[in-house]
Image (cartoon, rainbow, N blue to C red):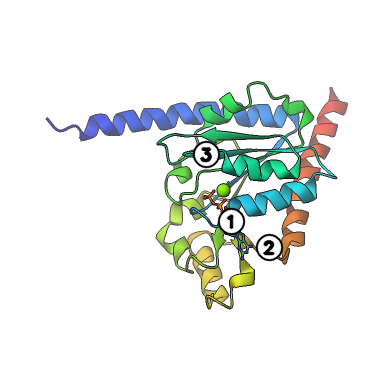
């Protein structure tokens, strides 16, 4: 017996169920005025380093928190917790991505009304996370200079499903002969018009622009919330 059609059906149902939960999460984030931002990239592209810096620098101005997904260990949550904001680790066991239900479960006892922004670091993987909506408002895809400029072409779906790209570890660009023009052209080839930031979370180069972008998105969300409250 050919099992392929059955497998496809199960996968379709899982994705459909994920979409239903993701939609409910998105509604919840909007209703509470929380901006949800997810980070996706290959393993080791610098998500946690970038996020720890982002949380630390946003914390004086906004109420921020983070969820972080990994197959195993609490390592990233411990690192992010150094920013002294609420952090929770989601361990996925054998799963190579986060699903909306895991976010929903992790937030069960959190009061979103007390958060301006929730950051979600996905499991390091350039394939699976692309298929799972987490209800986020903004998806950032990180690409480190050490990975090679061709990654957007090889993994177009993850770049297509993201809203902005962040080229990380630019302090190492010269050492690895990173071709910025080629990387940009490849990003634009798969996602025309995509906004691209270049940062080093080690030296802080480029972090200002990226943080300003996030602060603007946060301010816009808060203003919308104020207008909604006034209209009630
Ligand atoms: N030189 C340099 N190294 C960096 C930078 N950002 C991260 N790294 C290093 O890259 C390695 C991986 O960084 P992480 O932040 O753990 O990467 P990640 O994407 O969170 O990794 P996973 O969660 O395992 O997928 C660490 O050794 C970091 O110190 C950077 O801007 N410059
Ligand atoms: Mg990490």
* Rendered location of residue 5, percent (x, y): 23, 32
When the figure is inspected, residue 225 is found, relative to residue 194, above or below; the finding is above
Q: Find disc 1 in the rendering and name its residue.
A: 46
**Which residue appears at 21% of the width and 35% of the height?**
4
**Which residue appears at 72% of the width and 57% of the height?**
210
Task: Report if the CB atoms under discs 3 and 2 are less than 8 Å apart.
Answer: no
Q: Find disc 3 in the rendering and name its residue.
A: 73
* Rendered location of residue 131, percent (x, y): 45, 42
**Mark 2 CB near ligand 1 (8 Å cut):** yes
Instruction: Give the image quarter of residue 96.
Output: top left
* Rendered location of residue 169, percent (x, y): 61, 65
Residue sitting nearer the eye, 16 or 169? 169
Task: Report if the CB atoms under discs 3 and 1 are less than 8 Å apart.
Answer: no
Q: Find disc 2 in the rendering and name its residue.
A: 202
Instruction: Give the image quarter of residue 204.
Output: bottom right
Q: Is residue 120 visible?
A: no
When the figure is inspected, residue 180 is found, relative to residue 163, above or below; the finding is below
Give the number of the disc on residue 117. Answer: none
22 with respect to 138 (left or right) = left
Mark 2 and mark 1: Cα distance apart in space = 10 Å
N-terminal-most mark, 2 or 1? 1
């Amino acid at each position: 017996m050919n099992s392929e059609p059955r497998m496809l059906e199960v996968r379709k149902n899982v994705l459909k169920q994920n979409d239903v939960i993701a939609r409910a999460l998105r509604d919840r984030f909007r209703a509470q005025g929380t901006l949800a931002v997810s980070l996706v990239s290959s393993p080791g592209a610098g998500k946690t380093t970038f996020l720890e810096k982002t949380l630390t620098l946003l914390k004086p101005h906004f109420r921020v928190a983070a969820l972080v997904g990994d197959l195993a260990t609490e390592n990233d949550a411990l690192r992010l917790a150094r920013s002294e904001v609420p952090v929770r680790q989601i361990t996925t066991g054998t799963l190579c991505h986060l699903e909306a239900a895991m976010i929903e479960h992790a937030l069960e006892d959190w009061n979103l009304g007390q958060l301006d922004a929730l950051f979600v670091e996905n499991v390091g993987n350039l394939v699976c996370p692309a298929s799972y909506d987490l209800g986020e408002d903004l998806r950032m895809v990180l690409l480190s200079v050490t990975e090679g400029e061709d990654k957007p072409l090889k993994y177009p779906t993850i770049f297509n499903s993201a809203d902005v790209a962040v080229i990380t570890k630019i302090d190492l660009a010269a050492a690895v002969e990173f071709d910025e023009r080629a990387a940009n052209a490849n990003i634009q080839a798969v996602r025309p018009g995509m906004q691209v930031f270049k940062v080093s979370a080690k030296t802080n180069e480029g972090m200002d622009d990226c943080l300003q972008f996030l602060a603007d998105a946060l301010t816009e969300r808060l203003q919308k919330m104020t207008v909604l409250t006034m209209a009630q």
